[in-house]
């Protein structure tokens, strides 16, 4: 496999999406001077060894990850040695919380009362916001700011350089089961791929599909996967709610199979051929032959 010569102005970025229907890998080249990305390779393989975001068969999952990565490597002409994992699962939780601090007076400020807010103040208030008591089996994956409040002024997006006595941060936390994430990371790293970060699939989907106006005015993003459905609600350019439900498109397939007493494969074909996402396009007069 040929190598790629990199320089200081560009580097590789690899995303690995662990879904309940497919494992997907994307390799892109990032150019820092223009802040642009160029897609170089993609790979996808059917999921195996994972259900509702949890590992149920380690070796099967590793084989599926390896197959997706190899396809992407072949297209891109490079070797993947680290990646960001995109994960989901019904055990992922979203929590709204807040933290507040008193603003320390800057030595360089000439103002008699108010104090200038620095980046260190923002760091301190974010640490305060995330310092809530979690069960020992859970970790915080994302701390996503919703807005800042300076004294009585609310809905502030960037408080650095402003002045006040008290800084409050309202944030949305996304928490994950520690053991479940560790199992996914271990499966990936045993293939020689260092996990360079984790991202919630619902958040990644929002970054890829929503524009700034939608996030500002308010929008609910619903991503229906095989075993899970992610819901992320945005308003005023911040995430106000996130949840993962343990039901997805496979649930519809299984219901068809049970009700019609047919195999899952035949039920999937019927769903894909005759199903409609809009009730107005469906018909009570629909007839089709069942497999014998």
Image (cartoon, grey):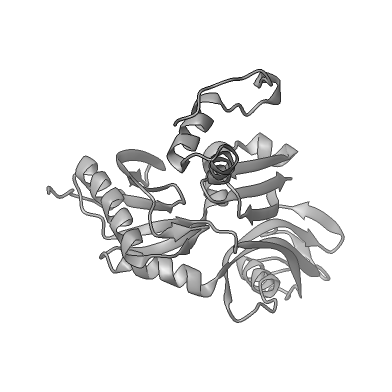
Horizontally, is 12 left or right of 115 in the view?
left
Horizontally, is 68 left or right of 138 in the view?
left
Residue at 18% of width from left, 44% of height from top? 77
Residue at 65% of width from left, 48% of height from top? 231
Name the residue at the right extreme. 152
Residue at 60% of width from left, 26% of height from top? 276
Residue 161's x, y, as percent? 68, 59
Q: Front-most of 180 and 25?
A: 180
| Residue 11 visible from this viewpoint | no
Count of marks placed on residues: 0
Name the residue at the bottom extreme. 136
Question: Which quarter of the figure is the C terminus placed in?
Answer: top left
Residue 80's x, y, as percent? 26, 55
Q: Quadrant of residue 214?
A: top right
Horizontally, is 118 left or right of 75 in the view?
right
| Residue 245 visible from this viewpoint | yes
Residue 244's x, y, as percent? 62, 55
Name the residue at the left extreme. 1
Q: Front-most of 72 and 36?
A: 72
Decide: is 100 above or below 6.
below
Residue 108's x, y, as percent? 67, 71
Q: Front-most of 97 and 233?
A: 233
């Amino acid at each position: 496999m040929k190598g790629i010569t990199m320089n200081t102005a560009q580097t590789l970025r690899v995303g690995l999406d662990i879904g309940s229907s497919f494992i997907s890998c994307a390799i892109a080249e990032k150019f820092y001077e223009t802040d642009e990305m160029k897609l170089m390779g993609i790979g996808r393989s059917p999921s195996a060894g994972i259900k509702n975001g949890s590992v149920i068969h380690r070796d099967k999952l590793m084989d599926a990850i390896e197959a997706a990565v190899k396809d992407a490597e072949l297209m891109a002409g490079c070797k993947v040695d680290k990646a960001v994992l995109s994960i989901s699962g019904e055990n992922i939780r979203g929590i709204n919380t807040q933290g507040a601090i008193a603003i320390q007076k800057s030595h360089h400020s000439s103002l008699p009362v108010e104090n200038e807010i620095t980046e260190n103040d923002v760091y301190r208030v974010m640490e305060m916001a995330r310092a809530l008591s979690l069960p020992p089996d859970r970790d915080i994956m994302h701390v996503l700011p919703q807005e800042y409040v300076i004294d009585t002024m609310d809905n502030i997006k960037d408080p650095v350089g402003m002045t006040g006595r008290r800084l409050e941060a309202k944030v949305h936390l996304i928490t994950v089961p520690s053991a479940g994430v560790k199992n996914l990371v271990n499966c990936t790293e045993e293939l020689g791929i260092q996990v360079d970060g984790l991202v919630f699939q619902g958040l990644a989907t929002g970054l890829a599909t929503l524009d700034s106006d939608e996030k500002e005015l308010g929008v609910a993003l619903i991503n229906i996967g095989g075993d899970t459905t992610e819901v992320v609600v945005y308003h005023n350019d911040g995430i106000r709610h996130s949840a993962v439900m343990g039901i997805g498109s496979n649930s519809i397939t299984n219901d068809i199979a049970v009700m019609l007493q047919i195999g899952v494969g035949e039920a999937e074909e019927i769903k894909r051929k005759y199903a409609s996402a809009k009730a107005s396009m469906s018909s009570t007069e629909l007839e089709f032959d069942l497999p014998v």
